[in-house]
């Protein structure tokens, strides 16, 4: 069958763009054909054509903004330009004091490779003489700006570039199915969790049961949605230092990214509200986003100031109402958290993580000393009971295991006896007892001053102390003698 001589058809993404351009050109040709057969005189038709040519060559300005993270937005914009023009070239700095270099940014891709991407002024010769595109990024509102001018006949090409950029951000973000660490919300860093499986994590039955609501959303999001269970959720891991809260979060992160979630580790809790709002940008290609924040008590204690209110409002809805976002928090001091933060709508589960009990202590030892590398005593009841009574947390138990292993290496042995374990546990208990000995060198007044200073700060403490000068004898700095 002979091929049609009509509008050529192109395949693929680049073809889609070309077809849209051809459609525009065909509409213009049809317009010309209509005018040619409209009955106007030949001179009038030529004048009309000349006017059309002049109009098409006039310059048209454009100004687009795209909500995105900086590196992802610039990378995807350049991909979109390459699909249409075949190559992106940055303009050289050729001013009087210019370096002659092209402005670029360094983008880390999902596989760990890095790519230099043109930024700033982009040269696209095909948009007509005096055409220009200028790319910039606003750190405060996280918008990528695409500004410039081109001949009017090419303005639809710029629209196509921006449209394609948004498509790539939504479907092929460099952050898709990644664990990210954020210190600057505009430029997330991809985390390497390849070694997290090697870290030992032993959870009690109570903790495992408490995690079910969270894990159901992470591992079975489709079933949750079908069952009318929203994926938006808040979970607080609380307990003293060393109980494994952070390790548990990263273990969950590994499961999450394997199940088409994005995991965000936020070191600075004051960036929580801003990060939640920005998560909309990367909540397009998967099940959703998990935002992990340590020490949430730092921003949710005391009176409800503007910063805390911003966090509460963002968690409640508005910016996150229709988002599949899971907030995972930790705290060592749940008693400091403002009670309204723990409201069910914001926090669906509070999971307490504590010291090893008898059963988890036994499992911890069995996993730490596997056969055939080690020969572990079968009867561990007495020493595991002692571990439970002492309230040893997993982090400190790991140190005890490490000490036992170094002793075995030194003595060239592989037999691990209950006595070996008990000896190290007793040494640990003695060390902890010494660390709890009170410093009697401070007077009660000095301890009170230090406590007030820690709780309410130096300026307020000094004011209180000044009011007490008739009760205590103070030095020149206002501290008790």
Image (spheres, helix red, strand yellow):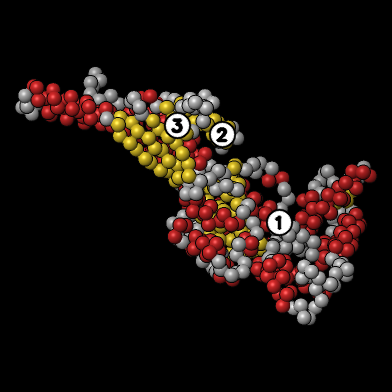
Tag 2, which secondary structure? strand
Q: CA distance from mark 3 to mark 1?
A: 49 Å
Residue 101 visible in the current orientation: no
How would you rate the neighbour count of disc 3 (Cα within 10 Å): few for under 14, some for 14-19, many for 20 or more? many
Marker disc for residue 121: 3
Q: Quadrant of residue 157?
A: top left
Of callouts 3 and 2, the N-terminal one: 2
In this view of the protein, can residue 398 be seen by the observer?
Answer: yes
Extreme right residue here? 411
- Name the image quarter holding the C terminus: bottom right
Residue at the spot 72% in from the left edge and 48% down from the top edge: 199
> Which residue matches tag 2?
106
Give the number of the mark in front: 2 or 1: 2
Residue 203 horizontal/vertical position (percent): 70, 58
The residue mark sitting in front, 3 or 1, is 3
> Residue lying farthest bottom?
471
* Residue nearer the viewer, 241 or 95: 95
Residue sitting at 38 percent across and 41 percent down?
64
Mark earlier in primary sequence (2, 1): 2
**Would you name the residue on which mark 1 appears?**
244
Classify residue 248 by image quadrant: bottom right
Nearer to me, 381 or 92: 92
- Tell me the residue at 40%/43% (across/down): 65
Q: CA distance from mark 2 to mark 1?
A: 35 Å
**x and y percentages locating residue 126 in the rendered image:** 36, 24
């Amino acid at each position: 069958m002979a091929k049609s001589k009509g509008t050529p058809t192109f395949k693929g993404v680049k073809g889609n763009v070309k077809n849209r351009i051809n459609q525009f050109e065909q509409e213009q040709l049809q317009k010309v054909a209509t005018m040619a057969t409209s009955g106007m005189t030949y001179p009038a038709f030529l004048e009309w054509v000349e006017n059309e040519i002049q109009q098409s060559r006039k310059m048209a300005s454009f100004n687009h903004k795209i909500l995105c993270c900086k590196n992802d937005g610039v990378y995807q914009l350049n991909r979109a330009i390459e699909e249409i023009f075949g190559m992106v070239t940055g303009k050289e700095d050729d001013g009087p004091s210019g370096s002659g270099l092209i402005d670029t940014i360094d983008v880390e891709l999902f596989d760990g490779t890095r790519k230099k991407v043109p930024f700033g002024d982009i040269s696209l010769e095909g948009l007509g003489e005096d055409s220009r595109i200028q790319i910039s990024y606003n750190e405060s509102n996280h918008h990528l700006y695409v500004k410039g001018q081109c001949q009017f006949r090419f303005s639809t090409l710029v629209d196509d570039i921006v449209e394609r950029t948004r498509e790539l951000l939504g479907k092929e973000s460099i952050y898709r199915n990644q664990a990210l660490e954020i210190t600057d919300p505009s430029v997330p860093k991809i985390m390497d969790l390849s070694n997290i499986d090697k870290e030992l994590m032993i959870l009690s039955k109570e903790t495992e049961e408490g995690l079910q609501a969270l894990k159901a959303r992470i591992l079975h999001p489709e079933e949750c949605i079908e069952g009318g269970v929203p994926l938006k959720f808040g979970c607080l891991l609380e307990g003293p230092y060393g109980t494994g809260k952070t390790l548990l979060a990263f273990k969950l992160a590994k499961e999450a990214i394997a199940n088409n979630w994005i995991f965000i580790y936020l070191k600075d809790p004051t960036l929580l509200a801003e990060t939640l709002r920005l998560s909309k940008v990367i909540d397009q290609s998967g099940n959703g986003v998990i935002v992990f924040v340590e020490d949430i008590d730092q921003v949710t204690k005391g009176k409800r100031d503007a910063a805390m209110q911003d966090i509460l409002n963002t968690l409640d809805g508005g910016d996150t109402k229709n988002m599949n976002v899971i907030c995972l928090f930790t705290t060592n001091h749940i008693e400091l958290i403002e009670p309204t933060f723990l409201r069910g709508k914001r926090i669906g589960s509070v999971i307490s993580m504590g010291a090893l009990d008898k059963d988890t202590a036994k499992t911890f030892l069995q996993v730490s000393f596997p056969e055939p590398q080690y020969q572990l005593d079968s009867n561990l009841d007495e020493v595991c009971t002692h571990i439970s009574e002492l309230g040893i947390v997993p982090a400190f138990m790991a140190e005890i295991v490490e000490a036992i292993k170094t002793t075995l290496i030194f003595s060239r042995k592989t037999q691990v006896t209950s006595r070996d374990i008990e000896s190290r546990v007793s040494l640990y208990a003695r060390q902890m007892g010494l660390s709890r000995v009170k410093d009697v060198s401070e007077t009660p007044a000095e301890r009170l001053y230090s406590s007030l200073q820690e709780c309410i700060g130096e300026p307020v403490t000094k004011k209180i102390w000044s009011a007490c000068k008739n009760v205590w004898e103070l030095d020149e700095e206002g501290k008790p003698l």
